[in-house]
Image (cartoon, helix red, strand yellow):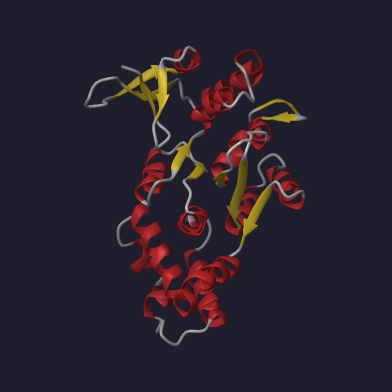
Amino acid sequence: MTKEKYALLDTDFISKTHRIRKDNQNKMIDRIMEMPGYRFYCHEQIRIELLRHNSGNSPEWLEAKISDGYVRCMSDEEIIAELHKIYSDSAEAMYASMLKNGCEAYKSGYFEENFIRLKALDYLSISQESFLQELKADCDGIGEGKNLGELKSYVLLQVLSIRLGKQIYVFCSDDKNARAGIVSLGSARCISVLSAFMRLYQDGVLLRADAEPYIQAYLSECKKHNQLTFRVHDASKQMQMCKVPCEQVIEEMYAGKLELLQNGNLRYKQ
């Protein structure tokens, strides 16, 4: 029996893997959904951000997966309800603490600068309804394009870790700073778009020959953004980063010369 795994999806990962495709009926994100034993989650903010970006019908894709039960999309209200089961009247304070942890992982002082209403609340007397109103007001003040999806995902990651007592996999941005922030919160394992090819191969979902159309689509996307190399750790104790041509990294990955680190980076085996 396949061991159950729990995973978070973020905006950047969904958008990119929705664009990487064999054809219109076969997208890389669909292959991710086929990975055995995974239960997928996302925060409602991811839904909002995909609608805002409207990249290649990815909002419709996510809505279909939520409707079909492949992805559970959780709102702040649902997260607070989960926290009440664990922390009772301290749920709102715990949410604020988790959000602050996520903000610190993202940028030092971000919580104090942007969540002014939450910072000023009296958590001994605040009601759930009032807390959610103040949270929304702060989020509205932050505005679009300010990594709210990332921050809300940090909160959901912490809630799932506590509630499930399991390691959480985060299918996330290729941005190394974002992935470093996720790892700093605990025992989560990051999977970037590049390292997702390795996971698909290891899980027997997408073998090398079958992966070729997706690989070429991914390399084409990289070239569109003038990305000709991937950064990979060498095999030394210092784990220095080196730039390696994209095609070479792909070949060496399937040849078993690379290992996947917790933060989603690849490293040459010793």
Left/right placement of residue 91 relative to residue 177 reads right
At a point 62% along the width and 45% down the height, the residue shown is 39
The correct choice, above or below, for 206 with respect to 140 in the image is above
Q: Residue furthest left?
A: 238
Residues 188 and 106: in front is 188
* Residue 29 seen by the camera: yes
- x, y percent for residue 52: 63, 53
At a point 72% along the width and 43% down the height, the residue shown is 61
Residues 263 and 45: in front is 263
* Residue 51 seen by the camera: no
Q: Residue furthest bottom?
A: 125
Residues 190 and 116: in front is 190
Q: Quadrant of the N terminus?
A: top right
At a point 45% along the width and 17% down the height, the residue shown is 249
The correct choice, above or below, for 44 with respect to 130 in the image is above
Q: Quadrant of the C terminus?
A: top left
Q: Quadrant of residue 214?
A: top right
- x, y percent for residue 232: 36, 24
Left/right placement of residue 265 relative to residue 64 reads left
